[in-house]
Image: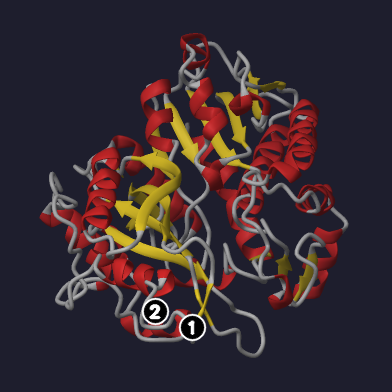
Amino acid sequence: MATMNDETDAWLKSSDSSDYFALLKMPTIGADPLHLRDCVQAATWLKKWLGTIGAEAELLLPSGGGAAVSASVPVVFGELKGGEGATTVLVYGHYDVQPPDPLEAWQTPPFEPTLKDGRVYCRGAQDDKGQLFAFLCGVRALLAAREGRAPVNLKFLFEGQEESGSGTLFRLLDDAGFRKRLAADVLLVSDTGAAADLRPAIVAGLRGVCHFTVRLAAANRDLHSGEYGGLAPNAAQGVAELVASLHNPDGSIAVPGFRDGIEPPTYAEQAAAEAGFATEEQLRADIGTEPCGGQLGKTPAQRNGFEPTIEVNGIHSGYGGPGSKTVIPCEAFAKLSMRLVPGQSPAACCDAVKRHLKDRCPKGMAVSFPEDGGLSAALRLPLASPLFRLAEDVLTEMDPRGPVFLWDGASIPVVSALKAASGAAPLLVGWGQPEDRIHAPNESYSLRQFALAKDWARRILAAF
């Protein structure tokens, strides 16, 4: 019987591992213009890799000019023809990653993949390079078993700005010719998580998202806190008051109009979500504290899957270095993001929060919004979908426990748009786990997860 070390050694000698590590080493921070060249390098690498399995691939950028186009990150689009009349499957993923900050919290260099105790540590190891590339390895294995003949028509769509709003892809979707090229029967997305202990999960819904930056300006410069204390308004204090006003004492959202239009889940959706969601004990072990965010009186599954949120992602003002600098800050910034549920309009929600903040701007200060982004509606899929039944059968073959259904609290902004553009039925199955620490230092992905993602690709494409 092969040991774990034998399996690890065999994996390290495979093209799967060498290719995966090559992709991980590229610091593809799509939101940072300084890493545009790295993103172009990764897109070119993926285009070439698709060619090795027989797909015709190209790099796409929106037409026209201007600053938005010059800062665009390439989209990789490829096609691999199957048999006459075969199902057409559009495979979506993203090769961009989150910034690695704070660097000092990493135990290994963030862009040097390191295998330790059966896990690969690197930024993007899971989100989404690991999930994307493991799926591609499954495609390669399936083609090898079928002597290069694809059982379906495959279309590949990989972008480099998912983490920052999918700007390039959304601009491409404005082109009718590009939308026509995306036409498919099924949209496969591998950018989500499994349930506890890697029990398979089918994602039946995603929250939408919008986010922006708040700037609060007061005096014309930072002021001496002795000479001007008791006279000048304090921007740091003001921004704290503003963000505190967004919620009521019970954790509910205090912004007028923000909850307008919400479509509550059905009884069947609520029951399925509760059955598949982590327990409070599991959540406590994961996040290291009580899972007490959100509104009192609602279950964790409700708060994470079916309720909107307004989160403060960061507050910046004044002095934060060693020792003391006794100033009254003249300006302050807050980064806010909102997760939205079906029925909510992203634009209307952003407007409601901005109006709320303007109405409560402290005296002697001015509020502005220098940066917007990420307007994306929520996605909800029908539980009765025949596609879900097929996926259930395949996942039960992989794991006799069978899959659970999850309503993911996260967002993949472009999925709703791709669904509309392609006419495809979405199927979101991924293999993420809390210990992967995506968006945080020491992100990782286990060899077991990689193998499951690869096996899922092989099985579901064969089933189609």
Three-letter code, disc 1: Glu
Residue furthest to the bottom in view is: 323
- Dot 1 or dot 2, earlier in sequence: 1
Q: CA distance from mark 1 to mark 2?
A: 48 Å
Left of 271 or right of it: where is 240? right
Taking the spot 84% from the left edge, 60% from the top edge, the residue there is 12
Residue occupying the point 47% across, 79% down: 286
- Examine the rendered structure and indicate whether residue 118 appears above or below residue 200: below
Q: Is residue 295 above or below residue 282?
A: above
Where is residue 33? Give x, y as percent: 70, 41
Q: Is residue 2 visible?
A: no
In the rendered image, which residue does mark 2 sit on? 283
State whether residue 112 appears in this view: yes
Q: Residue furthest front?
A: 227
Residue at 81% from the left image edge and 47% from the top image edge: 19
Quarter of the N terminus within the rendering: bottom right
Q: Which of 112/388 is in front?
A: 112
Residue 364 lies left or right of residue 148; in this view the side is: left
SS under mark 2: helix
Identify the residue at horizontal 57%, vertical 69% (top origin).
437
Within-10-Å neighbours for mark 2: few <14, some 14–19, many 20+: some
- Foreground pick, 240 / 342: 240
Q: Is residue 27 above or below residue 287?
A: above
Asked whether the beta carbons under mark 1 and mark 2 sit within 8 Å of each other, the answer is no
Classify residue 410 as left or right of residue 280. right
Give, as a three-letter code, the residue at label 2. Answer: Leu
197 w.r.t. 165: above or below: below
Task: Estimate the x, y position of residue 389 in percent, counting from the top left.
Answer: 32, 43
SS at mark 1 in the image: loop
The mark found on residue 227 in the picture is: 1
